[in-house]
Image: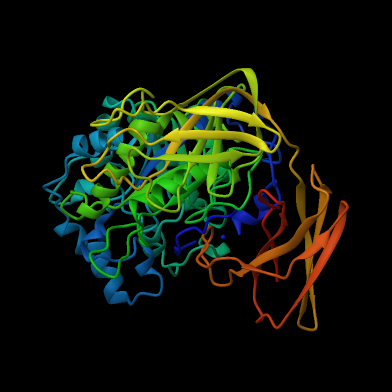
């Protein structure tokens, strides 16, 4: 059963090329070489394997305008000349994060289970958070003066966390200096139409990739073709994420993706710190997004936005520490894993160590699972072998505090599936009502079913009637399925984001593989994202997300 994602808002067209690559299921532990369908990628296969194994990264959005509690950089689009001049000339004179302690950030990231950091060295405004010879619009020309980027990388590397460069090819300061109206994603402001901007970007990227130690990853938030070639030339081992891979924001795709991918996720609605007009996701929501991303084969890049003084808001720290406890117990199901034959059975989600290692069943109980209580459930996609063992991550299966009960985990293979009986034995919080998922580890198991496979085909609109088309490529083990579609409006979205949830069409019963269609009337004019769905008696499967206008 699909679990509803927390609502969010922000950024889409680069996405369209890759959406067609989504698959409803993926072969168990499929090994990924060079990215299929990603033309010209020079990401090395061994480096992509390394990247996929990391699973969990930290994004850091921070700039000179954090002082205003404003959307990072974008307030300059459509701004008056007075606002723009004060932004570029006066705002840097007041930026002095005297409470900045990158060691504190990195230690918190380590506890949270973060494996790599992506720091905003330059966002769209053009303000560089590092020392540069290319522009005076830089951290060097603030009261703080110190090289924040260097200090961040040094601190995170000291914790064994890989360093990544976020870099925006867009540069509003450069546009303003050259009397070009500030805008994004229009041809006249792109580096490809401004040789001077492209040379300027390349000079800055060269500084970052030659003067800041080994950079493991790069994220180009804009036109990337020339810059990614520069990056690979300077560092053949660098992994380029945005600009090569599928990188949705604020959303997790509906299905397993064949190639490596990464979702960028905010804790609230904003990327940069906002003192008001902000609503945070719960720690449980963020944990859920993490393991569902991993079940679908992706990495999660979770964002923090430091306050102007350099500290983290307590809401952000608290959520990282809640995730840290869950990861301290359960990180084995996050690192070095690949998708199972199905991503979930209702509220139980799966990851598996690559190379057919242990299977992890992540049990997201709809009610709080109290310490010392048993639960029984059936895994229909899993079959035991003579070598199968079972355990609960973090527990010894021998002791419950203040109890004589022995919490031994057991399983029984029956005709309808693998029957599991486990006890939440470990006391993780004082009230014994820790709300986050328990993870069951199963060794030497094999798939017990062949899942159906559904593919999203084209849609078209005529006279206000939208016809969605899909294909059931394989019925799997099912004799009949309920097939249909889900859709949502995306007009007005930014480049990669989704802010609304899917709405389901009617379903029709299908008893054989082949094409199926459903018509929807009365949709408002605009652009919609949609995908096919197939409801198996045990699970719902999803086709690729596609676009209809």
Image position, residue 208 (x, y; %) = 37, 36
* Coloration of the structure image: rainbow
User: How many numbered marks appear?
Assistant: 0
Residue extending furthest top?
Answer: 387
Where's the C terminus, which quadrant? bottom right
Residue 412 appears left or right of 11: right
Q: In the image, 497: left or right of 85?
A: right
Res. 242 in view: no
Residue shown at the point (87%, 51%) measured from the top left: 513
Q: In this view, does 299 lie above or below 211?
A: below
Q: Residue placed at 50% from the left, 66% from the top?
A: 499
In front of the other: 8 or 219: 8
Front in this rendered view, residue 425 or 284: 425
Asked whether 514 or 226 is in front, the reply is: 514
Instruction: State the image quarter where residue 270 is shown.
Output: bottom left
Residue 476 spot, x, y in % from top left: 79, 43
Indicate left or right for 64 with 296 as reference: left
Front position in the image: 3 or 227 = 3
Residue 10 in view in this figure: yes
In percent of width and height, residue 111 lies at: 28, 34
Examine the rendered structure and indicate whether residue 286 appears above or below residue 530: above
Q: Where is residue 92 in the image (x, y as percent from the top left)?
A: 20, 57
């Amino acid at each position: 059963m699909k679990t509803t994602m927390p609502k969010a808002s922000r950024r889409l067209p680069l996405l369209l090329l890759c959406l067609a690559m989504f698959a409803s299921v993926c072969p168990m532990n499929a090994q990924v070489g060079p990215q299929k369908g990603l033309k010209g990628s020079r990401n090395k296969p061994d480096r992509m394997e390394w990247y996929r194994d990391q699973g969990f990264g930290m994004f850091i959005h921070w700039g000179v305008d954090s002082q205003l509690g404003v959307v990072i950089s974008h307030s300059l689009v459509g701004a008056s000349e007075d606002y723009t001049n004060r932004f570029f000339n006066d705002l840097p004179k007041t930026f002095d994060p005297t409470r900045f302690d990158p060691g504190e950030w990195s230690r918190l990231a380590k506890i949270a289970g973060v494996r790599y950091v992506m720091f905003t060295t330059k966002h769209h405004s053009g303000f560089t958070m590092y020392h540069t010879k290319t522009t005076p619009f830089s951290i060097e020309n603030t009261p703080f003066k110190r090289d924040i980027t260097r200090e961040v990388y040094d601190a995170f590397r000291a914790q064994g966390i890989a360093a990544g460069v976020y870099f925006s090819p867009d540069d509003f300061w450069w546009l303003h200096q050259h009397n070009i109206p500030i805008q994004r994603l229009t041809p006249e402001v792109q580096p490809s139409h401004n040789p001077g901007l492209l040379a300027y970007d390349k000079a800055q990227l060269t500084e970052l990739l030659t003067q800041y130690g080994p950079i493991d990853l790069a994220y180009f938030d804009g036109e990337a073709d020339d810059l990614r070639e520069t990056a690979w030339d300077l560092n053949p081992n660098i992994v380029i994420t945005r600009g090569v891979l599928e990188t949705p924001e604020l959303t997790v795709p509906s299905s397993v993706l064949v190639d490596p991918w990464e979702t960028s996720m905010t804790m609230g609605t904003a990327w940069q710190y906002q003192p008001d007009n902000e609503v945070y996701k719960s720690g449980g929501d963020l944990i859920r997004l993490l393991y569902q991303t991993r079940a679908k084969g992706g990495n999660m890049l979770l964002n923090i936005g430091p306050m102007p003084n350099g500290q983290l808001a307590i809401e952000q720290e608290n959520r990282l520490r809640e995730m840290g406890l869950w990861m301290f117990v359960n990180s084995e199901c996050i690192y070095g894993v690949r998708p199972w034959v199905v991503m979930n059975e209702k509220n139980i989600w799966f990851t598996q160590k690559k190379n057919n290692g242990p299977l992890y069943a992540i049990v997201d109980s709809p009610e709080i699972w109290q310490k010392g209580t048993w639960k029984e459930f059936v895994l229909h996609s899993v079959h035991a072998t003579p070598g199968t063992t079972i355990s609960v991550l973090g527990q010894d299966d021998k002791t419950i505090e203040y109890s004589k009960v022995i919490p031994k985990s057991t399983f029984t293979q029956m005709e309808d599936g693998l029957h599991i009986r486990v006890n939440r034995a470990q006391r993780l919080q004082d009230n014994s009502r820790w709300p986050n998922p328990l993870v069951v580890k199963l060794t030497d198991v094999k798939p017990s079913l062949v899942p159906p496979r559904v593919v999203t085909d084209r849609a078209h609109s005529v006279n206000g009637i939208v016809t969605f088309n899909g294909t059931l490529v394989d019925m799997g083990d099912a004799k009949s399925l309920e097939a249909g579609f889900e859709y949502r409006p995306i007009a007005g979205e930014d480049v990669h984001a989704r802010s609304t949830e899917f709405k389901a069409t009617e379903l029709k019963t299908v008893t054989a593989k082949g094409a199926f269609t459903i018509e929807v009337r009365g949709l408002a004019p605009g652009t919609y994202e949609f995908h096919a769905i197939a409801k198996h008696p045990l699970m719902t499967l999803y086709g690729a997300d596609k676009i209809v206008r």
